[in-house]
Amino acid sequence: MKIKRKTLYGYLFISPWLVGFLLLVLWPLIQSFYFSLNNMRITPTGLQFKYAGFNNYLDVWLKDMFFVQELLQFMLNISLRVPVIVVFALIIAMLLNEKVKFQGGFRTIFFLPVIVAGGPVIDQLISQGATTVPMVNQDVILSILTQFFPMWFAQVIGELFNQIIIILWYSGVQILIFLAVLQKIDPYLYEAAKIDGGSGWECFWKITLPTIKPIILINLIYTLVFLANSSQNPIIHLIYTNMFAATRGYGFASAMAWMYALIISVLLLIIFFVFREKKPKRMI
Amino acid sequence: MVFKKTKSFYALLTKEELSAKERWQLIKGKLVRFFFGFNDRRGFVMKLVIYTLLVCIGFVYLYPMLYMFITSMKSLEDLLDTSIRWIPSALYTENYSQAYSVMNIRHSLSGSLLIAAVPTMFQVAVAALVGFGFARYEFRFKKLLFALMIFSFIVPPQILMMPTYRLFSNLELTGSLKAFVVPAALGQGLNSTIFILIFYQFFRQTPQSLYEAAEVDGASQFTCFFRIAVPMAVPAFIVAFLFSFVWYWNETYLTTLYLTSQSNSLTTILLQLQQFQQNYEAMYPVTENSPNKINEGIKMAGTIISVLPLLIIYFFLQRYFVESVDRTGIAGE
C-alpha cells in the first residue's frame, strides 16, 4: 500500500509535465510525421491531404536545391565550431580558475553575452560588422590557408576567424559549467601528483581532463543542440520559408524538419558514444 | 644556514663577507623565483600570461558592445568620417530619440515585460513541482519518463512548430499571452527541461530524512513540498527565474510565429528591433526636402535600447547569474 501511494504522488507531481509532453510534444510529433507523408494544400475550406508516401522525403534530397548544400555547409561548420567553443570555454574556465584578481569582474564580462545575445541583436551586430576582430585581416588569412588546404576547407576556416566573436559569445554557459566542476576537483590530487614529480602539463592530462570528461560530454551536447536550434541557422530558415511557400507547403517542410532532426540525432549519438564514460574492464 | 638571521634581502646582499659571485647567485635565485615561481606560487611570467590572455579575451567579448555603444552616439557626419573611430566629435543623442519613437517603446516595453514575466512564473512553479516529483518519489517508468524529458529538449522545435501552431489556432490561443502561458504551465515552455533538471538536482541533494520526519509528524506530501522543499530551494528559484526571464525576453522565434501573424496589440521590443527598418521607413519617409535615411547609428541605438533593460537587471543581479552553477549544482556531484 505504501509503495502504491508513493507512485500515485509521483505521478501527481509530474502530471503537468506529463500532460504537456503528451499534448505538446508527442501528439505534434505524430501529426508532423503524418503531415510529412502527405501533400498538403491550404484551401478555403480547410486543409487538404493527399497521401504521398515517402515522396516528400525523396524530394527533400533530390529536388530541393538548397537543402543538401546547406546541410553539408552546416555539418562542416558544426564540426569545427562545437570543438572550438568547448575548447575555448575550457581554456577560459581554467584561466579563471587560477587565483586571479578581479575574478568576479572577469566572470561578469564572460557571461554578459548570455544575457544580451538575442536573435535580432546578433543579426544587427553581424550586419554591422561588429563581430569581426578589426585587427585581423581576412584576406591575408585566407590566402595563406589556400596554400595549404583545398579551397572549401580554407573558406570554412576563414569564416571561423571571421565570426570568432560570435563563436566566443556562445560559450558563456559552458564556461560556467566548466568552472563549477573545476572548482570541485580535490586539490589534494594535484598535491599528490606534484610530490610524485608530475608537471602542470601532466596534471592537466592525467587529472583534470579525466575528471571533467562527463562535463565535456554535457557541454558538447548542449553546444550542438544550441547551435542546431538557434535562429541564426540557415537550415531552420529554409524550413521556415518552405512552410509558407506556395509550391511546397507543410508536408514538404515537415519532411525536411524530420530529416534535419534525424541528422542532428545521429551527430548527438556519435558524440555520446565517443565521449561517454567507459565502464572499467574487470581484471580477472 | 649562515644567512638565516639577516632581516631583509638587501641587508643580506650588502654583507661584507660575500664575494661578487655569491651575490650574483643570490640575485639570480631571487629573480628566477620572481619570474618563474616556486612550489605553488605562480611566477611573474605565468601571471603575466594569464592576465594578458584574460584581458585580451575580455576585450574581444566586450568589443561588440563597445562598438554598438560608440556607433549609436555618432551623427551622420561622424559615421561618414573615416578618421573618427572611437570618439565621436560631439555628444549626439538624436539617434536615441529617433529609435525611441520608432520602436514605440512604452508599448513594446510593457509587452516584453508581460511576455517575459508571466510565463516565467508559471514555468518556474511547474518546473519545481515536476523536479520535486522526479527527485522525491520512486514510481514505475520513472527512468523512461526522465529520458523522454531529455529527449523533448533535443527535438528540434521546427518539427513541432506546425502542428502546435495549428493546435493553438484551433484553441484560439494565438495572438495573446495565452500562447506562451499554456506551454509554460504544462512544463513545455522555453527550455523547461533545463529548469526541471536544475530543480531535480537541487531536491535530490536535500536529505530524505527531513521529509520522513515531517511525514511521521503527520504532514501531507504537499505540506512537505511547500514547507520543506520550497524554502530550501530559494537559490534554485532565483536562478530559474532569472534565466527564464532572460530567455523569454530574448525569444523571437515563437513571438514572431504567434504574435506577428495577427494584427494585434501585443508586441515585444525584440520584435520591434526585427522590423526596425520597415518601421523606420514608415515613420520617417524619404522626401525631397528631408532626406531621412536610416543609418547604422540609429540601428545601433535601437539595439542598445532593446538590450538595456536586461543589462540593468544583469548589473544588479550579476552575482546570482554568475554563481548560479555553483549554487544549484548543475555540474553534478
Image: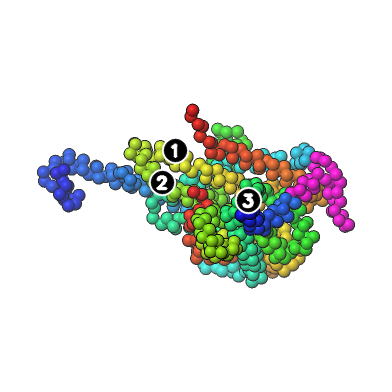
Numbered tag placed on residue B139 in the rendering:
3
Q: CA distance from mark 1 to mark 2?
A: 15 Å
Amino acid on which the number 3 mark rests in the picture: Phe
Say whether disc 1 or disc 2 marks the residue closer to the N-terminus.
2
Q: Are marks 1 and 3 on the same chain?
A: no
Q: Is residue B327 above or below residue A154?
A: below
Q: Residues within 10 Å of mark 2 (few under 14, many from 20)?
A: few
Q: Is residue B202 above or below residue A259?
A: below
Q: Is residue A17 visible?
A: no
Label 3 is found on which chain of the structure? B
Please give left or right for residue B329 compared with residue A46 in the image: left
Judged by depth in the image, the label closer to the viewer, 3 or 2, is: 3
Report helix, strand or loop for mark 3: loop
- Which residue lies under the disc numbered 2? A186
Q: Residue furthest top?
A: A284
Rendered image quadrant of residue B121: bottom right
Residue drawn at (56%, 48%), measured in percent from left and top? A167
Report if the CB atoms under discs 1 and 2 are less than 8 Å apart: no
